[in-house]
Every structure is written in structure tokens, then in C-alpha cells.
Amino acid sequence: MNEILTLIEKVKNDRQNGASHLALQSLEILKTAAYQSSAVSPQLWAEEIIGYGHLLIEARPAMTPISSLVNEFISIIRIKAAGFFRLRSDCGGLQTGKKDRGAGSSHIN
């Protein structure tokens, strides 16, 4: 079991702390997962973090502060990921860093 899943399991089994404390702990787990991710693309990174978020909600479904905070975090991840993909598609031809030098270009070699 990886470190993030171990931390989620601790939230699931914690009977000492209240919902507010566990909600903040859940957010820290998601932040740790975001920083430690080895996903090879922003889309896979977002899917991984969202998946961990759903596991946290499922770990303590009756604790509204956890689901509220985790859902807010997931919303931010989705918005940021959508913005990245929109930016990437808007940049289309700029991926190589070369400008199109058409027939009317006044480029001097």
C-alpha cells in the first residue's frame, strides 16, 4: 500500500479526532498526493488526485466537513486542469516554439 493510501486508511480508522480536524487532515493528504505524484501528464495527475479525494470521502461518508472540503479541492483541480488543456489547445502551433514564417516574411538570415 502506498503512503497516500496508508494516510487515507488512518483517516478512516481515526476515532479520536472530530470531523473538522479530519477534514483538514484530508486536505493535507491531497496536497501531499499532489506534490508526490509521478503522473506523466496533467490529465493523469488530475485523475489521480481526484481519485484520492473520492477515497477520502468514502472513508468517512458521514462527515460532512470532509466531503465539503475535499469536493471544493476537487473542483479547483478540475478547473485548473481544464484551464491547462484549454491553454494547450489554444497554443496549438506554438508547441515547438517556432513562429510560422510565411511567404511574406521579412526574416533576414
Image (cartoon, rainbow, N blue to C red):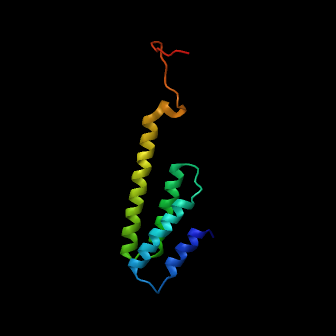
**Which residue appears at 44% of the width and 84% of the height?**
17
106 or 50: which is nearer to us?
106
Count of marks overlaid on the render: 0
90 or 102: which is nearer to us?
102
49 or 62: which is nearer to us?
49
* Left or right, 51 with reference to 65: right
Q: Please identify the quarter of the rendering in which residue 86 is found.
A: top left
- Indicate the position of residue 51 as horizontal and vertical percent values: 50, 62
Q: Where 3 falls versus 102 (above or below)?
A: below
**Which residue appears at 47% of the width and 60% of the height?**
50
Single out the residue that lies furthest toward the front. Answer: 108
**Which residue appears at 42% of the width and 48% of the height?**
82
**Which residue appears at 49% of the width and 82% of the height?**
14
- Indicate the position of residue 109 as horizontal and vertical percent values: 56, 15
Single out the residue that lies furthest toward the bottom. Answer: 16
- Indicate the position of residue 23 as horizontal and vertical percent values: 41, 74
102 or 64: which is nearer to us?
102
- Indicate the position of residue 107 as horizontal and vertical percent values: 50, 16
Q: Please identify the quarter of the rendering in which residue 62 is found.
A: bottom left
Q: Where 28 falls versus 74 (above or below)?
A: below
Image quarter hosting the N terminus: bottom right
